[in-house]
């Protein structure tokens, strides 16, 4: 289970986070009452590890390692744009 609080802290769309986690755990996920649920049993450690992987891939700037980023989409491409250092890195979205 994850909550909207995680998405708020990461400043990302909760549905994107849910989709990423569900794909990585090879299961279905849904939001109900502000919380994300997955089919099957998954340990807190597994979910925390995957949230960390999501953060490293879609939140943390690969140049300055700060979380002050936003995802910008242009045509079919997505970029991680850092507000701190100005770096722009292409990312593959889920």
Image: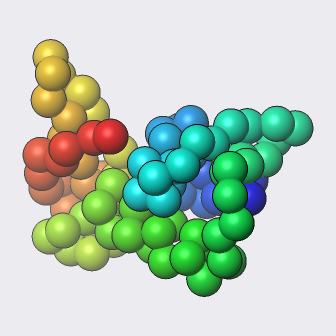
Note whether 74 is above or below 30 in the view shown. Answer: above
Note whether 48 is above or below 17 in the view shown. Answer: below
Note whether 49 is above or below 59 in the view shown. Answer: below
| The N terminus - image quarter | bottom right
Q: Residue furthest top?
A: 75
Residue 14 position by quadrant: top right
Note whether 57 is above or below 17 in the view shown. Answer: below
Relative to residue 70, is residue 50 drawn left or right?
Answer: right
Q: Residue furthest bottom?
A: 45
Relative to residue 5, is residue 22 drawn left or right?
Answer: left
92 or 47, nearer to the observer: 47
76 or 22, nearer to the observer: 22
Who's the residue at 12% across and 51% down the image?
89
Residue 27 in sight in this render: yes
Relative to residue 23, is residue 41 drawn left or right?
Answer: right
| The C terminus - image quarter | top left
Who's the residue at 27% across and 33% down the image?
72
């Amino acid at each position: 289970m994850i909550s909207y609080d995680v998405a708020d802290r990461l400043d990302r769309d909760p549905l994107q986070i849910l989709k990423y986690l569900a794909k990585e755990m090879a299961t279905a996920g849904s939001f109900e009452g502000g919380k994300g649920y997955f089919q099957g049993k998954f340990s807190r450690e597994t979910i925390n590890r995957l949230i960390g992987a999501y953060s490293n891939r879609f939140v943390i700037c690969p140049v300055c390692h700060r979380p002050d980023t936003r995802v910008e989409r242009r045509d079919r491409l997505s970029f991680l744009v850092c507000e701190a250092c100005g770096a722009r890195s292409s990312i593959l979205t889920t």
